[in-house]
Amino acid sequence: MASNVLPHAPSRAAFKFDRLAPFALMAPALLALLLTFGLPIAWLVVTSFSVPDSAAPGTGAFTSYALIAEQKYYWGVLGTTIKLGVCCALLTVLLAYPLAMFLARTTSRWRSLLVALAISPLLTSMIVRTYGWMILLSDNGVINGTLRALHVIDTPLPIANNFFATVIAIAEVLLPYALLAMMSGFGRINKELENAAAVLGASPLRVFLRVILPLSLPGVATATLLIFVLSVSSFVVPQLMGGGRVFVLATEVFSEATVTLNWQLAAALSMVLLVIFGVLISLYQRAIKALEY
């Protein structure tokens, strides 16, 4: 005989537990984030508004920011930083797009091996890979040496210790990250849409331009954001590949903090870099919303 007794309603204590459980589960991660990110950022903000010891009496808290705004040198560093991020992001995404599309769509039994090989450079130190590019691009390196041996050139090509070399090295170093970001984007594309376009008479090129490319743009946007952020915050590659001629915010922060010991200016430059990240993330979110609609 079926029971007519209704199930008990959840108690108030159980209701509170259900509401608080997600916060309790997130508490360790939030605490770790606060200690490793929040507190250092707060320290940077306070330090950036501190008055340097060498400042003139009566100097305000915006001394470091005023120095950055007044000197053309720092505007040039800021421009070089943004230019480096844009060039590296464009080059890396252009190189990674066809490879990511192939790896995401291939049905070969070697697919897993190919994916592993594509991201295997991440197993090698960035410094080691950068030194490898220094050997390849130097005046007596593999490229210039081969071209001179073939009598193609008489003098070495200026492809080392400059902005070009820095972009090439960063693009190669960050290529696996772009691959992973765009492969996940290609994996979310419904192939039935491509089949439907082909059945309706669209050529392969038209299918790519009207179906695949628009649907893959969210993955492209994610890869572009990732590569730009990693590029503008890169220190090792510009320091080594630039040959002391490529000055970006990361190298200036290092120089001010360790050479001139002007921690206030280093913190202010770090905040400028953080503002660039914030603006870019805001633009990324707007772009993603626009692509979704």
Image (spheres, rainbow, N blue to C red):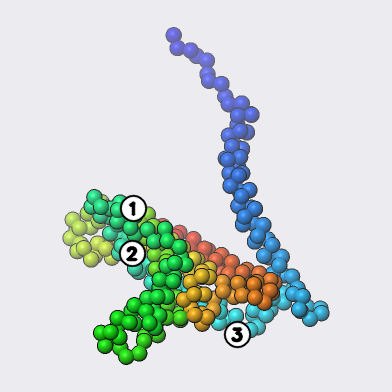
- Earlier-in-chain disc, 2 versus 1: 2
289 on left or right of 30 = left
Position above or below: 154 against 234: below
Task: Looking at the picture, tell me which residue is in the foreground, 180 or 117.
Answer: 117
Question: Are there few (<14), some (14-19), or many (20+) residues within 10 Å of tag 2?
Answer: some
Q: Position of residue 129 (x, y in %)?
A: 42, 67
Going by the picture, which residue comes out furthest to the right?
Answer: 57
- Earlier-in-chain disc, 2 versus 3: 3
Between the C-alphas of marks 1 and 3, the distance is: 46 Å
Q: Quadrant of the N terminus?
A: top left
Amino acid on which the number 1 mark rests in the picture: Gly
Residue 210 falls in image quadrant: bottom left
Measuring 32% from the left and 91% from the top, which residue is drawn there?
Answer: 154
Q: Which residue is mark 3?
A: 72
Measuring 49% from the left and 61% from the top, which residue is drawn there?
Answer: 285
SS of the residue under disc 2: helix
Amino acid on which the number 3 mark rests in the picture: Lys
Amino acid on which the number 2 mark rests in the picture: Tyr
Residue 114 seen by the camera = yes
Residue 88 seen by the camera = no
45 on left or right of 197 = right
Q: Are marks 2 and 1 in contact (CB under 8 Å)?
A: no
Q: Are marks 2 and 3 in contact (CB under 8 Å)?
A: no
Q: Which residue is mark 2?
A: 97
Residue 51 falls in image quadrant: bottom right
